[in-house]
Image: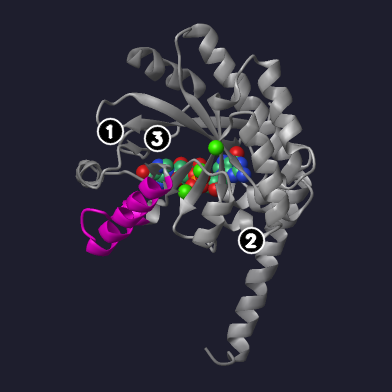
Amino acid sequence: AKRQGGNGVGVFTEDMNEKGKRRTIIEMNLRTSIDDEHLTLEYQPEIDLRTGTILGVEALVRWNRSPLGVLQPGEFVEVAEATNLAGELGEWVVTRACTQLAEWKRKIPDLRITMSVNVSPVQLVSMDFDATVRSVLHRHGLVGSELCLEITENVVVGDLQRTKDTLRRLERLGVWVAIDDFGTGYSSLGHLKALPVDTLKIDKGFVQNLEHSEEDRVIVDSIVGLASSFGLQVVAEGVETVGTVKQLLDLGCTRAQGFLLSRPTTPDRLRWMLQAGS
Ligand code: C2E
Ligand code: CA
Ligand code: CA
Ligand code: CA
């Protein structure tokens, strides 16, 4: 578009101010809210579509009683990343998630699931992230293969060498690495080769409409093929209908997550689901 008129520019500026104000409020309050009192995790299962078995859960952060009411995690995670809070937030999340898994395992002794945690790009290149992960696992008697880190493709736009080093150290612990929102980012296929990736998580944008979009079917089909030729696992997110489940099974994708299967839920409700399935 060409230059906007005076009105357009005015609205645009006000918008920026509104956004800036929200960010400032978030930043000021998040700083003192990274603790068990203000933050909680919800857990969304990852299911084997053939059997209904819960293979793992993804931890998703929630800010209770935030100063701005209900906030999407995307919004305050972005602020954390833009300030110096990403490390602290990420450390809280991975610690809470591992503590939860250890708690479930005490109640369900034969439990075998992986805990997936979203990791910010900033966090991944922070000096001691892998040390943090190692000590959290150790503290709870967990092994690396019980943890999966979900990173976005954009992570590798940053410091590739450092990202690679950190991921390799984590890989040596047995930790799994998944590329989140696969298909939407800026990474090249070369990065896939360069990084110790185990799983591609197909973005929900390609999954939600699978029944009705031939293009989405072609995309999902190619990602499944790509994963198989690289020896990677594939997970679909955003499964909302039974028709989508059928399509995914047809395309050879057996592992999925979505509102149809379960919404993100509390630790207690998830424990019931795990117990019912064991
Ligand atoms: P994501 O990692 O792609 O997480 C999946 C998001 O999709 C979650 O939203 C989940 O509630 C939602 N979802 C799951 N199934 C369905 C479905 O069938 N349909 C639709 N429409 N949505 C579905 P949520 O919890 O609001 O999280 C949004 C984003 O915020 C996450 O996207 C992730 O990028 C970020 N995030 C959440 N928790 C954390 C965290 O602890 N750390 C970091 N760094 N980022 C986080
Ligand atoms: Ca994720
Ligand atoms: Ca996603
Ligand atoms: Ca690996």
Badge 1 marks a residue whose secondary structure is loop
Nearer the observer, disc 2 or disc 3? 2
- What secondary structure do most residues of the magenta stretch adopt? helix
Residue 194 belongs to the span the image colors magenta: no
Tell me where residue 232 sits by quadrant. Answer: top left
The residue at the point 77 percent across, 45 percent down is 126
The stretch in magenta equals 206-230
Question: Which of the numbered marks, if any, corresponds to residue 263?
Answer: 3
Q: Disc 1 marks which residue?
A: 49
Whole-number angstrom distance, CA of label 1 to CA of label 3: 16 Å
Give the camera-side residue of 275 and 21.
275
Side of 69 relative to 58 (left or right): right
| Circle 1: residue type | Leu
What crowding class fits label 1: few (fewer than 14 Cα within 10 Å), some (14-19), or many (20 or more)?
some
Residue 220 belongs to the span the image colors magenta: yes
Tell me where residue 231 sits by quadrant. Answer: top left
The residue at the point 40 percent across, 26 percent down is 55
Query: Does any portion of residue 74 appear in the rendered image?
Result: yes
Q: Position of residue 87 (x, y in %)?
A: 75, 42
Query: Does any portion of residue 69 appear in the rendered image?
Result: no
Q: Disc 2 marks which residue?
A: 157
Badge 2 marks a residue whose secondary structure is helix
